[in-house]
Amino acid sequence: MSDVGLSVTRVTIDGFRSYKTAIIEPDPHLTVFVGPNAVGKTNLIEALQILTATESFRNPQWSEVVNWEKQDARLCLIAEGDGRSLEIALTITRAGKRAYQINGKPKKRLAEVIGVFPSVTFTPDDLRLIKDSADKRRGALDSLGAQLSPAYLGAKNEFERVLKQRNAALRAEVIDQEELSVWSERLVSSGARLFGARARLFERLADRIEDAHSMIAGGSPIRSVYQASWNRDGLLGGEGIGLDPEEALKRALKLKQGEERSRRMTLVGPHRDDIRFFLDGDRDVRAYSSQGQQRTVALAWKLAEVAVIKDVSGKAPILLLDDVMSELDEQRRSAMARLTGETTQTFVTTTNTGYFEKDLLDRARLIKLGS
């Protein structure tokens, strides 16, 4: 494990999903939750993600995570290292209200919790990260950015608020041109700010994706591109690449104003950006590569997130892997297993320990569920 930062030493779960009560004391390097399907392995990964990233890959209604025999769910994580101790506690009520505490002090805003102890989560759905639509890639980048910077999270939230208001203005029975102009100006400024934050973050991530992809795929080169909405479909032609983001967004909105009115929605901005990957120079991974190659890029992305968090924050995130080994072929499984637990504290769920080499299991803590 990295000697930078904290590692989880104890997790307490009470009334969360299938767990009435549970206490986990993980290994500082690698903890493997092993057992058949439907015994609660994924619930443990979800609990760790909610405590750290304040979100769940399942995107639940929060009232749904409370055990049916309990009035609320309580989660608590204790992490130690470098002579420090950190406690993150969360109560989720039957009504779906969440209340976080850090070292006993209540936190009113999620922004006060996100990034305190970062994490990277990798699930079977993430193997479709490259194949799926652009909003999944944008969402993954924004989740990373939110853990790294309150300013990033603020830029994202502000843009989404402005976008909602502008779309409402476009959907009005009679469009108020003055109101639409106000929201257009705010969309330009907030959109340019979010675009800049994303582009800077993705530049860091792309370098690390290249490193991880080379390690997994045996040196196969990859090129990554963050593509602004105004550069998609040749909207601004070649000049769009060199324009200031605010100016580019202004021009794109002007060109799209007729279509926006007819479709009653905002058609340019960071919510329409994409992230693209190319192998062998110009072969679009999403369009022309095999499922295995797409999964390699997705795997490289997630490993890159770990590296970027360390680079930017100086903190070693926990890595949460939910049943991904069963979805990988032997080559990619072997590459993943070699990295598991070596550079950051890792939690893995699996139905089959045969996916791991014996020496890896010998140095891991195996927690058997449903036996």
Image: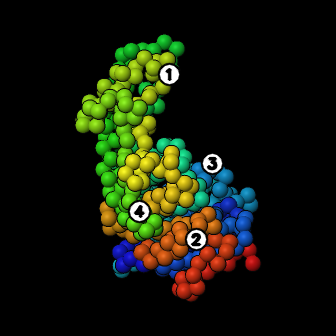
- Identified at 63% across, 61% down, the residue is 73
Asked if residue 369 shows in the view, the reply is yes
Image quadrant where one finds the C terminus? bottom right
For the residue carrying disc 2, how many other residues have a C-alpha within 10 Å: few (<14), some (14-19), or many (20+)?
A: few
161, above or below 33, in the image: above
Please tell me which of labels 1 and 2 falls first in the chain: 1
Front residue of this view, candidates 62 and 333: 333
- Identified at 53% across, 61% down, the residue is 122
Helix, strand or loop at label 4? It is loop
Front residue of this view, candidates 234 and 246: 234
Measured in 3D between alpha carbons, the distance from the residue under mark 4 to the one under mark 1, in whole angstroms, is 44 Å
Please tell me which of labels 3 and 4 falls first in the chain: 3
Measured in 3D between alpha carbons, the distance from the residue under mark 3 to the one under mark 4, in whole angstroms, is 41 Å
Q: What amino acid is labelled 2 in the image?
A: Glu
Residue 269 figure quarter: top left
Which numbered disc covers residue 220?
Answer: 4
Measured in 3D between alpha carbons, the distance from the residue under mark 3 to the one under mark 2, in whole angstroms, is 36 Å
- Identified at 38% across, 60% down, the residue is 221
Measured in 3D between alpha carbons, the distance from the residue under mark 4 to the one under mark 2, in whole angstroms, is 18 Å
Q: Which residue is mark 1?
A: 264
For the residue carrying disc 1, how many other residues have a C-alpha within 10 Å: few (<14), some (14-19), or many (20+)?
A: some
Q: Which residue is mark 2?
A: 330
Q: Which residue is mark 3?
A: 61
For the residue carrying disc 4, how many other residues have a C-alpha within 10 Å: few (<14), some (14-19), or many (20+)?
A: few
Asked if residue 142 shows in the view, the reply is no
Does 197 sit left or right of 115 as displayed?
Answer: left
Q: What amino acid is labelled 1 in the image?
A: Arg
Viewer-side label of 4, 2: 4
